Amino acid sequence: MLFWKKKKDPSPPRESSPSQKAPASDEEISGVRTRPSSAIVSPPKPSQFPRKRGFVSPFLTAIRSALHAEVVLFIRFNPESNTYYIDEVSGHRTHVALQDNFSLPPFLQELREHPEARTFSSTEFAEGGLPYADPSISVPHILTVPVALPEGTGFLLADRKHLDTPFTRHEHYLFTEMAQLLGIVLREEEPAPPPSRSRRAILKEEMERATETGTPVTLTLIYPREAHRFSLQGREEIEKTEQLIQEYLTTWFPSLRTEKFGELMFGIFYYGSEEEAAAWMHELNQRFLELEGPLNKGFFIGAARLTSTHQTPEAWRNDARQALLEAYETGAITYFVEET
């Protein structure tokens, strides 16, 4: 993993991807990468786009461009009719025969239990009882992956009608990761805790404590790398996993305050210097990697150190959330700090 501190850059920011690596010129310390909070240029805050078509549409367009696909479809479940429908499309779907209110064929039902992307042909779709394209049209490569959503499982589909080149292994991986990110964003509407223990109140308490003690504090958000697997197994599995994460955190770090900040997401408050916080984040992830069981794939970790720029609890939390999103995109622990 990487640690870097990046100074302000007047040039336009570049979009990151899971395959990008940190520039060699950046400073590295303790296996965690930091960026100045005053110079952050990140994706929109999750609170700005849950369930809004304005987010999903450009998201699908970005996927279509990355995969050189002709069409990308986002399919969602309708709990009222117990059927599926096409929620969003990127590209010209003139060859796509899917209509709203259809049921899943068995091979897609099985895919819900195995959340990696798989490639099917239009012939396989037709044989499974769900015609993807007009019978006169052959679509050899339809990349398909489930998306864990609040109301059930959705699907992303991408096709290459005019390309004989199959989707590569890396493109399978990328499609799986993007489906997971879409699920994370659309599940951000989870109800907040009761008012007496609201996340805002928790953050405000820690801001006041840091001011009173004069000790630097970092809000660290963690999210399992295998979260999509737990989400697809239902609410009971999610709750069991959350309990397990909480038990590990309180056992390993009993002096640190740990709070739930969303589905499978936890916030930990670390008091100490920037270097100490970075070293602790690396230790935290390493402990999970050394486990046996479902959590040994590690965590996405994003953190924000409380600075004078954080005038409200929301500002502090938003920086930590942005760091977590960037950690997801790059695969590296990401730590936003005040620029020096």
Image (cartoon, helix red, strand yellow):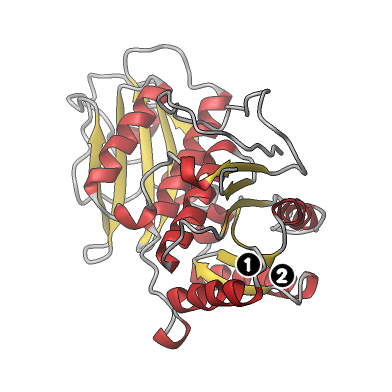
* 297, above or below 8, in the image: below
Q: Which residue is mark 2?
A: 249
Mark 1 Cα within 10 Å, few/some/many (few <14, many 20+)? some
**Residue depicted at 51% across the width and 47% down the height:** 37
Residue 279 in view here:
yes
Q: Which residue is mark 1?
A: 268
Q: Earlier in the sequence, mark 1 or mark 2?
A: 2
Please tell me how many numbered marks the rendered image carries: 2
Place of residue 271 in the rendered image (x, y in percent of width and height, measured from the top left): 69, 66
- Residue drawn at the location 57% of the way across and 41% of the way down: 35
Secondary structure of the residue carrying tag 1 is strand
Frontmost residue, 149 versus 50: 50
Tag on residue 12? Answer: none
Q: Is residue 199 above or below residue 123?
A: below
How far, Cα to Cα, is label 1 from label 2? 9 Å
Q: Amino acid at mark 2?
A: Leu
Name which quarter of the figure residue 93 lies in: top left
| Residue 257 rendering spot, x and y as whole percentages | 65, 75
The reply to whether dot 1 and dot 2 touch (C-beta < 8 Å) is yes
Local packing at callout 2 (Cα closer than 10 Å; few below 14, some 14-19, many 20+) is some
Establish if 143 lies above or below 214: above
Q: Would you say 251 lies left or right of 298 here?
A: right
Residue closest to the eye, 201 or 273: 273
Image location of residue 266, percent across then percent down: 58, 66
- Residue 258, compared with residue 129, is above or below; it is below
Residue at point 63% right, 68% down?
Answer: 269
Quarter that holds the C terminus: top right
Query: Foreground residue, 214 or 269?
Result: 214
User: Which residue: 40% across, 47% down?
Assistant: 182
Quarter of the rendering occupied by the N terminus: top right
Amino acid at dot 1 = Ile
The answer to whether residue 122 is visible is no
